[in-house]
Amino acid sequence: MKLPGTYLDGFLLPVPTAKLEAYRQLAQQAAAIWLEHGALHYVEAAADDLSTEFCRSFASAADAREDETVVFAFAIFADRSARDAANAKIMADERLQALCPASNALFDSKRMAFGGFKTLVNE
């Protein structure tokens, strides 16, 4: 399935497995904010199979502990300028500010990785 847009923000973070359902609820609220402010698509996914022998695993990249689940998330935007405009609105949104204290209780944001990416292939 070809997804719309040419730019995406990606997130990688470890979440305590015992708090995964609470994190899912928070992520669902965050998704609504991202979509309202311009994201075309928003996904949060919990790791299911991180076994690998040929490269570094997402668990290693996220510095995940045994009692943590790695979450991989991304938001797709029309282009970089749409993403920049959306992120300005998202970060200023009072609903996101209200979610921040809850997110601090659910995961260590200092161990979260983030980046913006230009699409290379979208088939």
Image (spheres, grey):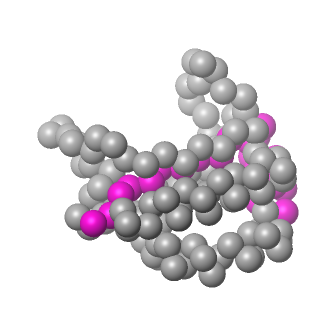
Q: Residue at x 62, y 63 (%)?
A: 26
Q: Position of residue 47 (x, y in %)?
A: 37, 47
Check if residue 69 falls in the magenta segment: yes
Count of numbered marks: 0
Residue 70 appears in the rendering: yes
Check if residue 53 falls in the magenta segment: no
109 vs 77: above or below: below
11 vs 78: above or below: below
Q: Position of residue 101 (x, y in %)?
A: 63, 81
Q: Could you say which quadrant of the image residue 91 lies in? A: bottom right
Q: Residue at x 27, y 66 (%)?
A: 67
79 or 24: nearer the viewer:
24
Q: Which residues are magenta?
A: 67-89
Q: Is residue 18 left or right of residue 59?
A: right
Q: Is residue 110 left or right of residue 26?
A: left
Q: Could you say which quadrant of the image residue 1 lies in? A: top right
123 vs 100: above or below: above
Q: Position of residue 71 (x, y in %)?
A: 44, 54
Q: Residue at x 74, y 69 (%)?
A: 96
44 or 77: nearer the viewer:
44
Q: Is residue 66 left or right of residue 113?
A: left
Q: Is residue 2 left or right of residue 50?
A: right
Q: Quadrant of the C terminus?
A: top right
Residue 88 appears in the rendering: no
25 or 61: nearer the viewer:
25
44 vs 113: above or below: above
Q: Position of residue 23 (x, y in %)?
A: 53, 63
Residue most extreme to the left: 53
54 or 50: nearer the viewer:
50
